[in-house]
Image: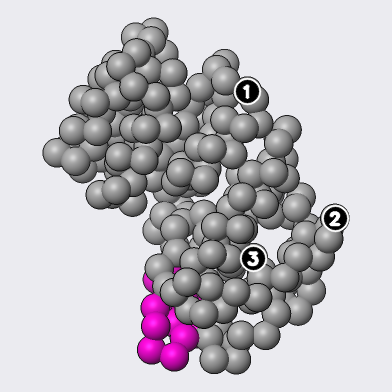
Amino acid sequence: MKTLIIEDDLSIIDLVALTFSVAWPDIQTVRTQLGKEGIELAETEAPDFIILDLGLPDMSGVEVLQEIRSFSKVPIIVLTVKKDEMDVVVALSKGADEFISKPFRQMELISRVKNVLRRSHPSEGEVYAMGNLTYYPALNKIESNGRELKLSPTENIIFLHLANQRPNYVTYRSLASVIWGDEYPGCHKAIRVLVNQLREKLALVLNQPDLIVTKYGLGYYLGNG
């Protein structure tokens, strides 16, 4: 197991590294205080997951996130003191898999990281046939009429939850629970951003713009594929 920590505060780096050594005694920790170097290390070190601070001295954490996402799907957990809901929305919309605010509880951090890693490596499971769509949760993909859409780990969690509850709708609260384990301030807005991004992919790649239907004020459900 290898992690990359991109964080400007050395005391936080040491605390995170110590926390992970409890869960994974043999973990290798690569660390940097700079965003640019973090991007390079993400490519050369091939970490199993990344801890990324949004407030870096040389460039914004969101820029680092975007750069890493241009070449890697490695799980990225954003760790920051910023608590404004827009920070959560922006980080998730740019490809973050998890968002944890400082100060954090050490066991909570371990739990969140393990949850992200499980989402990134789904176990073999059922194949879902829905009209002209075939959904493979274990492979993070949907196929339709010879076209294939690859889903991010978070998108896969959302679509699997919708598929399991079809034709019933799923609430914002239940989506927050399966994605992050609990609700937090601003999570409903973050969910709307994530669902809208998934809709855009479904429309662009599979020509399925109306597959995810909004039940206004309550949540979402899957229509007919």
Q: Percent position (x, y) of residue 66?
A: 36, 40
Q: Which residue is drawn at 39% across and 45% down?
A: 75
Q: Is residue 9 located in the magenta-colored stretch of the structure?
A: no
Query: On the rendered structure, is 145 left or right of 102?
Result: left
Q: Name the residue under label 1.
A: 83
**Residue placed under numbered mark 2 in the picture:** 217
Which stretch is magenta?
134-148
Please tell me in which quadrant of the rendered image residue 34 appears. Answer: top left
Secondary-structure class at tag 1: loop
Q: Can residue 87 be seen in this view?
A: yes
Q: Where residue 153 appears, x then y in whole percent? A: 46, 56
Q: Distance between the residues labelled 3 and 2?
A: 18 Å
Mark 3, residue position:
161
Does the image show residue 21? no
Q: Which amino acid does label 3 sit on?
A: His
- Label 3 crowd bin: few (<14), some (14–19), many (20+), radius 10 Å: some
Badge 1 amino acid: Lys
Question: Of marks 1 and 2, which one's residue comes earlier in the chain?
Answer: 1
Contact check, label 3 and label 2, Cβ < 8 Å? no
Label 1 crowd (10 A; few <14 / some 14-19 / many >=20): some
- The amino acid type found where label 2 is placed reads Gly
